[in-house]
Image (cartoon, helix red, strand yellow):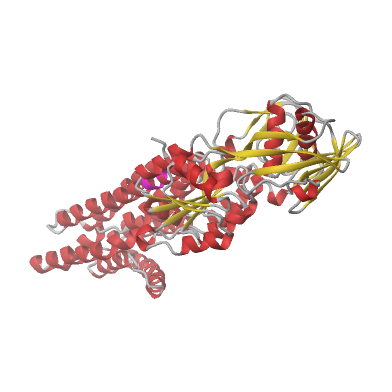
């Protein structure tokens, strides 16, 4: 039975009991009705508490159970009914607060793309988004949701990506630009080639993460446990002393009635769900409340280099032509034309450089990607190869300190292009912000050359470098962190980062250009291509936990003050039960502050 149904049932029974006592003067019937309902509810709560205790955790429901039993035993059955109404009403209020707090997360599920318009020759057919295949040509009309990830082949439009990245400003999309599923097209039609199947596309991945976060709610046990035992002892001591001094057992019941455990049960979960909602609005999907707790207490952070500390694209550093028949512009034109449909980092960098130089690219046909070697394709009637030195037939190969692609046209080697990493402009500020938030140990884990890694680490302010790492070596570094450096965060974006993200106390994936594997392995996903969101995630988590603690303590302090007043006999049991709702409302309203950006 849902919490709202329990609440309504309890209220209905209360109304029947009121009619019996004050309408028909059937006091005993009213008492037994409340006693039976109270007994059933107490037994169900007791079973739940025993299960909690068996799992090695402390059950704060013991206070509520004692209050119901004590009020029934001393004949204050209306107070007992009020406690029942407050408990079921509090649970219903928790459901409502959680619903409100996670509204932004769930709105993603409601707007999931369902259909796509596939273009085949002159014919346009509608099909379910799950049936779209990589390589299909798709039409997205003005105002429609982009159904799957792809690359624009025709048209120009402004696209709203706010539901994915938190970026409110529409982004201009032109030929060769990437489109993310779930973004909303502006006022012009676009044709794009599908680069990822529906199940792997950005929006569906995001929906999967949100469903996962809803299916695995955090238990928030540690925060509640910290206060539950001392609070219960204080309640029993105040009630026991009041009973001993007054020689009246009613006084014990009056104290326990106001000893509401609801601040412990409600405040922390509501604050953490609210914090998850707030993170989502800022382009950060946090899968569980436990992740927020760990982020707030993090002591160290490790970064992958390429695509994380650097931009995920490289800057063309040098163009070397070894042929009398081709110029540097020819070399770039043919290489970028061949790479324009590849999602590889070097391909994206080449195409971006060509667009920046306003170089018109040729159409590409017969494209084939050779794993670990490069691509071969037909461009402007010529057979081209772009990739490793041996693949392109180069007589020379640069050292590991240089990132390069080699190009051949019609089986004739014509030259190479070298690249350099572009450090994200926000990287240094992000590291400084993390240091200011209390994370002093910063680590770089990269497969790149030692000299390049050290140079970038120095530039952004990272203190510890592990270069030329294989995926298993990254895992070992994270596993061997000292206790004083935990919880530890790992930030990455590639397939080879997925194992490290899974092993870390908190894994954060850069999801805008990152791999699906990385996003699925991570505890949190940054949806906007902006590293500063990592420090923002830590800041929001710390703020959320501060509000959670404040909300719990505010509720408990009010409870203790009311218990002390009730111990004097000033507060009748019925009024004390009603005051529980005031405590619950104050705690929940305080916790909901975590939803608001300040």
Q: Quadrant of residue 111?
A: top right
Q: Position of residue 246 (x, y in %)?
A: 9, 65
**Highlighted range, magenta:** 539-543
Query: Which residue of the protein is positioned furthest toward the bottom in this rendering?
Result: 54
Q: Is residue 421 visible?
A: yes
> In this rendering, would 162 be left or right of 179?
left
Relative image position of residue 191 (x, y in whole percent):
79, 33
Q: Can you name the residue that lies furthest to the left here?
A: 245
Residue drawn at x 47%, y 60% is 478
Q: Is residue 493 magenta?
A: no
Taking the image as shown, residue 238 lies to the left or right of residue 150, namely left
| 541 part of magenta stretch | yes
93 or 139: nearer the viewer:
139
Placement of 511 over or under 157, stated as above or below: below
Q: Determine whether 228 is above or below 104 in the image.
A: below
User: What number of labels is visible?
Assistant: 0
Nearest the viewer among 304 and 15 is: 304
In the image, residue 151 lies at what x, y percent? 74, 37
Percent of width and height locating residue 82: 32, 57
What residue sits 69% from the left and 50% below the top?
Answer: 200
Asked which quadrant contains residue 419, the reply is top right
Residue 21 visible, this orientation: no
Q: Quarter of the image containing the C terminus?
A: top left
Left or right for 353, reference 558 = right
Occupied quadrant, residue 116: top right
Residue occupying image coordinates x 33% and y 44%: 590
Which sits in the foreground, 147 or 379? Answer: 379
Prevailing secondary structure of the magenta residues: helix
Instruction: Tell me the residue at 70%/45% (across/down).
Output: 344
């Amino acid at each position: 039975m849902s919490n709202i149904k329990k609440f309504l049932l309890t209220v209905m029974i209360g109304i029947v009991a009121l009619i019996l006592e004050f309408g028909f003067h059937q006091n005993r019937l009213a008492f037994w009705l409340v006693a039976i309902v109270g007994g059933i509810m107490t037994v169900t709560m007791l079973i739940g508490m025993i299960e909690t205790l068996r799992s090695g955790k402390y059950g704060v429901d013991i206070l509520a159970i004692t209050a119901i039993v004590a009020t029934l035993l001393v004949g204050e059955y209306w107070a007992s009914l009020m406690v029942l109404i407050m408990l079921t009403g509090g649970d219903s209020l928790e459901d409502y607060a959680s619903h409100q707090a996670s509204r932004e997360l769930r709105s993603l599920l409601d707007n999931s793309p369902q259909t796509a318009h596939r273009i085949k020759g002159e014919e346009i057919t509608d099909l379910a988004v799950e049936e779209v295949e990589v390589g299909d040509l798709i039409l997205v009309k003005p105002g429609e949701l982009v159904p799957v990830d792809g690359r624009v082949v025709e048209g120009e439009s402004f696209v709203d990506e706010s539901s994915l990245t938190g970026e409110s400003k529409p982004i201009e999309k032109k030929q060769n630009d990437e489109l993310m599923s779930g973004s909303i097209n502006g006022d012009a039609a676009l044709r794009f080639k599908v680069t990822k199947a529906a199940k792997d596309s950005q929006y569906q991945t995001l929906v999967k993460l949100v469903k996962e976060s809803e299916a695995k709610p955090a238990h928030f046990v540690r925060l509640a446990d910290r206060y539950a035992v001392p609070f219960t002892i204080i309640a029993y001591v105040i009630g026991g002393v009041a009973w001993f001094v007054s020689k009246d057992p009613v006084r014990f019941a009056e104290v326990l009635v106001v000893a509401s455990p609801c601040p412990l049960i409600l405040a922390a979960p509501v604050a953490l769900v609210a914090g998850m909602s707030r993170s989502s609005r800022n382009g950060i999907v946090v899968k569980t409340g436990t992740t927020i707790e760990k982020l707030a207490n993090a002591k160290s952070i490790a970064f992958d280099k390429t695509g994380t500390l650097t931009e995920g694209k490289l800057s063309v550093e040098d163009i070397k032509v070894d042929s009398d028949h081709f110029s540097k512009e020819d070399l770039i034109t043919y290489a970028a034309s061949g790479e324009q449909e590849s999602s590889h980092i070097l391909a994206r960098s080449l195409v971006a450089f060509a667009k920046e130089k306003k170089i018109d690219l040729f159409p590409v046909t017969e494209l084939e990607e050779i794993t670990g070697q490069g691509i071969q394709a037909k461009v402007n009637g010529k057979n081209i190869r772009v990739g490793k030195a041996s693949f392109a037939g180069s007589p020379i190969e640069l050292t590991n300190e240089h990132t390069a692609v080699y190009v051949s046209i019609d089986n004739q080697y014509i030259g190479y292009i070298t690249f350099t990493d572009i450090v994200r402009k926000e990287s240094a500020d992000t590291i400084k912000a993390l240091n200011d938030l209390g994370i002093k140990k910063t680590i770089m884990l990269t497969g790149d050359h030692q000299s390049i890694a050290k140079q970038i680490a120095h530039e952004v302010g990272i203190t510890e470098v592990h270069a030329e790492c294989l995926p298993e070596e990254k895992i070992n570094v994270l596993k061997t962190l000292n206790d004083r450096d935990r919880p530890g965060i790992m930030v990455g974006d590639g397939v080879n980062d997925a194992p490290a993200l899974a092993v870390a106390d908190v894994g954060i994936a850069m999801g805008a250009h990152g791999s699906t594997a990385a996003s699925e392995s991570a505890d949190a996903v940054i949806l906007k291509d902006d590293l500063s969101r990592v420090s923002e995630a830590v800041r929001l988590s710390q703020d959320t936990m501060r509000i959670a603690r404040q909300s719990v303590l505010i509720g408990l302090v009010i409870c203790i003050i009311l218990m002390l007043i009730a111990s004097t006999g000033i507060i009748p049991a019925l009024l004390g039960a009603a005051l529980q709702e005031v405590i619950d409302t104050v705690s929940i309203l305080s916790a909901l502050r975590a939803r608001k950006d300040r």
